[in-house]
């Protein structure tokens, strides 16, 4: 045995007064002695685990044997036997091959025993290969295109466990699968997360990388070494990358420039979202990626060497950048989402280089921490073909603090609006009809009047199809646009408002929207029934949230008048919504496709019974979505019993219903065999048994 050899060598060295050599040899003898004893112990325990069918524990012991004695055949032999018992012949063959390779150069003194063990490994490998050959493996039998379709369906799983994780599990089946799977993932996007945290996971991901991968997203890689490792592997394996994304990755110029020099000319989509402590700049990115059509670049607050810059430091950088040359070459970008500080690249300068721009997302907020703002009408001048324009309050994962000082109180502003609303007159702005803007999203106005958008609205009033004002705003915001009521939005189909506004302005504006089909008010407490007098009767969708000025009578009358056209209604925390309105919805249910009721405390079990009975009797043949969410005790088994015989019902959401039991859930499932989505979050009376029953009959069941 190896420890005997070290013992004899050490004794001889001691006899010849070579004390250093004696100490070294005896230390090696001790290590070899303990290693051999440990391997023998682990071997016995692994066999015992295997007999008990605890293969995971058995494999852990076998791996420990290989780790402590990689030159010994015992660990490989035990691991291969465990895989063979599990009929996992591919892995068994792999581990036997590794054992033969690792023990081919062993210097163990007991060469006879080792030779016998090596011969046993060869024999077991031949047996495994014979069994593997006789085994029916669909990877070997089915045509390649059929295998690709199967793997594509596995990757498109919608239960949150699809994509790369499913493919990684398949890679563990056998070596044959490991060779075929990467070739089946054609034009796939791989999300690579937390690279460098798990070596085995990284190895599996590396198997998937290859010429067939066209899109890669890196996220949450927070060390430079890990980022560099992932990028180098991508360059070596993937030659056809078209789309590249970085999200919360530690990335620098030293990492990016070599990559973009290799693949930049192939890229059509590049996304960089909030790179902490990054020193990337926009101009070199543009030069290295001349064929981009989609570009996203968001940076955190201005930083200098990982720390927030002071005002003096910002001014120094801005002064230095003002003298820097700016590239004037034109770009082919059609989609742009950018949030950078002024000294990195002025947005205006970038827009001048994008004459083909169709979609633009930029922030709207004060110039703080080196941020910048651009006038909306200037954007239209620079981008004449712009069709989608989104002024967001805060772009993805950005750090922005709104100003705390507002000179005039909200109450005072509302009073001023009421005094001036009577003087609203029609505005005869003469548009040239050359604008192409179809969608305009204006973010939280952040305490500002928003007059800066009036010129843009006047220029695009005849082309806009979707207009959202105050996206993400609350009831503390105020829209002081006295000219707004005079605009004529002749093609507007969707209007969403989440800022306080004069009723006179809204009524005047809505009267001039003949094509309006989608209307939504969120957190607009001063809105009242006068709005319904101006809304076209052919409205298809109506959504109200926290709009407490609406009355039940006025809303009910509008719903009856719009009965033939109204397809979707959504009511969230509205005081006007009560049992009487449920009866109105039951009367007009023939045309409804979606009903969403969320947290309306005045609705009782009686009202919901009227609703579901009307749905069943009408019948509501078009209804496909029914939401009764956070309705407290109003949703009961009796209510759910009425949800039946609806031929197109696909989605039911009863989240937050405290009195619903297993019987009620089974009733909904049995009565609606076409149901595809059942959402029962926070339903404390529903047990796991009922959920398992639902999962056997419904494609997607969501329960927290």
Image (tube, rainbow, N blue to C red):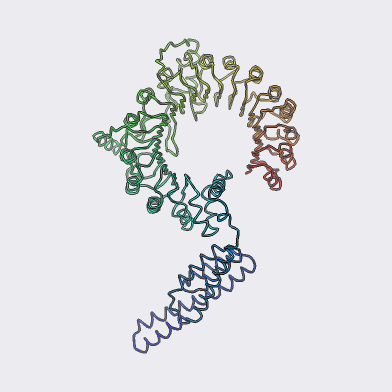
Percent across and percent down for residue 323 are: 23, 34
Residue depicted at x 42% and y 35%: 400
Where on the picture, by quarter, is residue 390?
Answer: top left
Residue depicted at x 25% and y 35%: 325
Percent across and percent down for residue 182 are: 48, 52
Residue depicted at x 38% and y 50%: 235
User: In what quadrant of the picture does the C terminus appear?
Assistant: top right
- Residue 501's place in the image compared with 351, above or below, is above
Where on the picture, by quarter, is residue 532?
Answer: top right
Relative to 65, is 249 on the left or the right? left
Q: Which residue is outermost to the bottom?
A: 15
- Residue 668's place in the image compared with 561, above or below, is below
- Residue 505's place in the image compared with 300, above or below, is above
Relative to 143, is 283 on the left or the right? left
Percent across and percent down for residue 194 are: 46, 51
Camera-side residue of 354 and 518: 354
Residue depicted at x 58% and y 18%: 528
């Amino acid at each position: 045995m190896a420890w005997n050899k070290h013992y004899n060598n050490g004794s001889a060295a001691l006899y010849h007064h070579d004390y250093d050599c004696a100490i070294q040899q005896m230390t090696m003898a001790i290590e070899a002695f303990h290693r051999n004893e440990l391997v023998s112990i682990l071997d016995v325990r692994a066999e015992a685990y295997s007999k008990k069918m605890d293969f995971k524990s058995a494999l852990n012991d076998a791996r420990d044997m290989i780790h402590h004695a990689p030159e010994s055949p015992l660990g490989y032999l035990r691991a291969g036997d465990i895989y063979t018992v599990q009929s996992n012949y591919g892995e068994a063959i792999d581990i036997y091959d590794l054992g033969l390779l690792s023990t081919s150069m062993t210097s163990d003194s007991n060469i006879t025993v080792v030779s016998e063990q090596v011969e046993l490994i060869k024999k077991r490998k031949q047996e495994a290969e014979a069994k593997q050959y006789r085994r029916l493996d669909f990877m070997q039998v089915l045509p390649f295109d059929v295998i690709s379709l199967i793997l594509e369906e596995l990757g498109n799983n919608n239960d949150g466990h699809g994509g790369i994780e499913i493919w990684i599990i398949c890679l563990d089946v056998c070596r044959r699968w490991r060779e075929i799977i990467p070739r089946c993932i054609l034009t796939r996007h791989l999300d690579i997360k937390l690279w460098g945290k798990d070596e085995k996971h990284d190895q599996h991901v590396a198997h998937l990388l290859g010429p067939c991968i066209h899109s890669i997203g890196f996220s949450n890689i927070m060390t430079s070494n890990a980022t560099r490792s992932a990028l180098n592997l991508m360059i070596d394996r993937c030659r056809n990358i078209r789309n590249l994304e970085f999200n919360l990755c530690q990335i620098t110029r030293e990492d990016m420039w070599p990559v973009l020099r290799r693949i930049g000319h192939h890229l059509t989509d590049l996304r960089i979202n909030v790179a902490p402590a990054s020193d990337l700049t926009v101009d070199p990115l543009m030069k290295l990626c001349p064929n981009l059509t989609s570009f996203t670049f968001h940076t955190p607050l201005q930083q200098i060497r990982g720390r927030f810059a002071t005002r003096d430091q910002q001014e120094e950088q801005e002064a230095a950048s003002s003298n820097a040359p700016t590239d004037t070459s034109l770009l082919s970008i059609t989609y742009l989402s950018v949030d950078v500080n002024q000294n990195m690249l002025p947005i205006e300068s970038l827009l001048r280089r994008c004459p083909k721009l169709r979609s633009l997302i930029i922030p709207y907020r004060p110039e703080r921490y080196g941020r910048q703002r651009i006038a909306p009408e200037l954007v239209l001048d620079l981008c004449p073909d712009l069709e989608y324009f989104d002024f967001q309050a805060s772009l993805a994962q950005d750090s922005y603090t709104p100003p705390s000082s507002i000179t005039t109180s909200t109450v005072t502003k509302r009073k001023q609006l009421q005094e001036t609303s009577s003087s609203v007159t029609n505005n005869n702005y003469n548009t040239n009809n050359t604008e192409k803007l179809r969608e305009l999203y204006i973010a939280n106005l952040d305490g500002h009047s928003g007059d800066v958008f009036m010129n843009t609205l006047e220029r695009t009033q005849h082309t806009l199809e979707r207009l959202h004002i105050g996206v993400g705003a609350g009831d503390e915001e105020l829209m002081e646009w006295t000219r707004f009521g005079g605009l004529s939005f002749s093609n507007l189909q969707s209007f969403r408002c989440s800022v306080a506004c004069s009723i006179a302005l809204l009524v005047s504006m809505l009267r001039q929207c003949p094509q309006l089909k989608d209307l939504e008010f969120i957190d607009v407490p001063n809105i009242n029934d006068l709005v319904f007098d101006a809304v076209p009767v052919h409205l298809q969708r109506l959504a109200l949230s926290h709009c407490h000025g609406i009355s039940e009578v006025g809303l009910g009358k509008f719903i009856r008048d719009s009965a033939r056209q109204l397809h979707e209604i959504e009511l969230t925390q509205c005081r006007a919504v009560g049992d009487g309105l449920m009866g109105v919805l039951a009367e007009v249910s023939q045309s409804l496709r979606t009903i969403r009721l969320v947290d309306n405390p005045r609705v009782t079990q009686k009202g919901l019974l009227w609703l579901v009975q009307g749905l069943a009797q009408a019948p509501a043949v078009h209804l496909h979505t029914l939401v009764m969410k956070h309705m407290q005790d109003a949703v009961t088994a009796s209510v759910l019993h009425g949800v039946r015989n609806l031929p197109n019902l696909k989605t039911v959401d009863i989240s937050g219903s405290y009195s619903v039991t297993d019987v009620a859930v089974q009733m909904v499932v049995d009565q609606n065999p076409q149901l595809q989505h059942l959402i029962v979050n926070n339903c404390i009376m529903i047990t796991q048994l009922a959920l398992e029953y639902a999962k056997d009959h419904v494609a997607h069941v969501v329960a927290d």
